[in-house]
Amino acid sequence: MLILITIWEAISKFDIFPAFMWPPLIIPNDPGGVTILKTLVNGLMTGQLIEATSASLVRLFVGFFIAVVIGLILGYLIYKYKVIDDTLGFFVTSLQAIPNIVWMPLAILWFGLGVGSVIFIVILGAALSIIITSSAAFKSVPPLLIRVAKTMGSDGFHLFRTVIFKATVPQLISGLRLAWALAWRAVLSGELLGGSGGLGTLLDLGRSIQAMDLIFSIIIIIGVIGSFIDNFIFVRIERYALRKWGMQTV
Amino acid sequence: MSDGHIILKNVHKEYQSNEHAPTIALDDVSLTIKKGEFISLLGPSGCGKSTLLNIIAGLEDHSSGTFLVNDKPIKGPGNDRIVVFQESGLFPWMTVLENVMYGLLIKKIPKEEAKERAMTWLQKVHLGKFAHSMPHQLSGGMKQRVAIARALVMDPEILLMDEPFAALDEQTRMVLHKELETLWRETGKTILFVTHNIREAVVLSDRIVLMKTRPGGIKNVFPVQASRPRKSSDSILIHLENRILTELEQEMEKVLKEELGSDYSLEKDRLRVDPHNNMGSDI
């Protein structure tokens, strides 16, 4: 990390690239000049960056939540009915191969520039992945557990709720973790193209006013939020689940 | 009312395969099991003993024939017939106590009462101390005790056991034989016990059903007349073990001949010889 910062500063000091393309990270090139750190702190202080960040996070959570609900329901239907598996399941797998951002022009025409189209591609991106991971997880439940539950008198939705769903919790969490990363990407690419405020739109603004310091400040925020949620939320829940489910004894 | 508790008459089961002729798993099986009887199904793999157990459990349907429990035809699983499987099949996300309570809560028994009954049964299988442990913290023998408690707490009329001790070591198995016999005598349940271990069958059962292969079915039924509690060194039992072993080896020879060609034969002097004294558990 330290080495990277040093190399960065060195490139900026030796004027290999003009300052608007390669702004210094911490130490300004001329007194009072622009640095990425300063822009980041200023942006946070004035609330401009915080506002954009919270706008992006709200879209992320709304979109992700809806995606989880849709994903689990369709995942269940694919697991439960062979007809749906053969039709929708196949369709979903092929949709999964299309990058999220490709849907943005369609979303803009349908929902207009703004929050609607951003949330749409977040849902699309995350839900497809959740459908695939959850239906695969439901199918992989050991038949023994299902037989045990059946012999005790469980059946239908009770069987799903108390056994199949519970048995797959560790896989579902891994699936959500993956979907979460996809959703975070979708939010930013959506905002970048679809406007409507948020970090992505601010990035686009940075490009048009050639403010590389702003662009890098935002990239730092995106990276920090991404790894924070991954490491502090998902990794912990995952570890807890694996321990409780007895899959890992550490 | 007839005196039969479980009645199977000409039960036939075949599995449909795509191109070939259907595989016959059970051919014309007739068996009457009395209430409170301890019956073992014994036989080489592929003889349909597990299929028969699954049919009685309601986990599989039979293709034709009559199958009655208490004079009523049976469709689907029911909590009057609980199965204990070879692997415990405990739910890994529940504590031992919650596992034992699972079936009771399905029966809509109030939580407090379910807890109490589950604890009572855990104590009967000597696992009261482990009520709040997770399944992965238990040994194989302990897991199987939990599985037995989980089945018996439901107070089923019939307990179906599908090679419940096959994955355990010999010492644990011997201890669990004694405990199972005690529980059986205390509760008076009808037990149907699937095994491939002759000694296990002989020590535990009232009657032993020896099964045959291709097609699967009943070859012979041996009543066990030794008094209880039994010791495996009882001469009646040893004599019976040898009789069953002889018939079982004929059956094995038939299978091996089909699989390996007709020139295969078990050496004649290997009959009735059991150097490791494990009575067919290696079959």
Image: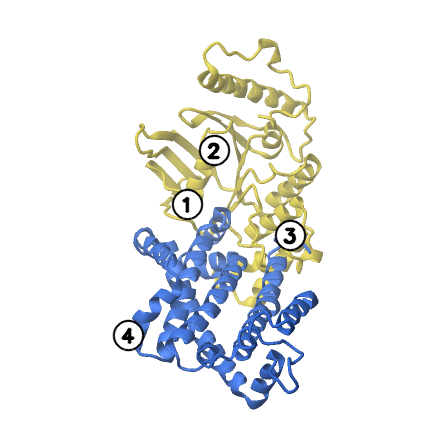
**Type of the residue with mark 2:** Lys
Tell me the quadrant of the picture where the C terminus of chain B can be found: top right
The residue that mark 1 highlights is: B58
**Type of the residue with mark 4:** Trp
Q: Given the image, what chain letter belongs to the residue carrying mark 3?
A: B
Q: Which mark is residue B136?
A: 3
Q: Given the image, what chain letter belongs to the residue carrying mark 4?
A: A
CB under 8 Å between discs 3 and 4 = no
Let me know if marks 4 and 2 both belong to one chain: no
Residue B7 in the image, given as x and y percentages of width and height: 41, 38
Element type at mark 1: loop
Judge from the rendering whether residue B130 lies leftward or rightward of residue B263; answer left or right. Answer: right
**Type of the residue with mark 1:** Gly
Q: Which mark is residue A231?
A: none
The residue that mark 4 highlights is: A110
Any idea which chain is the blue one in this picture? A
Q: Earlier in the sequence, mark 3 or mark 2?
A: 2
Quarter where residue B177 is shown? top right
Q: Alpha-carbon neighbours of circle 1 within 10 Å: few (<14), some, or many (≥20)? A: some
Let me know if marks 1 and 3 both belong to one chain: yes
Q: Nearer the viewer, residue A24 or B166?
A: A24
Whether residue A153 can be seen here: no
Q: CA distance from mark 3 to mark 4?
A: 52 Å
Q: Alpha-carbon neighbours of circle 2 within 10 Å: few (<14), some, or many (≥20)? A: many
Residue B61 in the image, given as x and y percentages of width and height: 37, 41
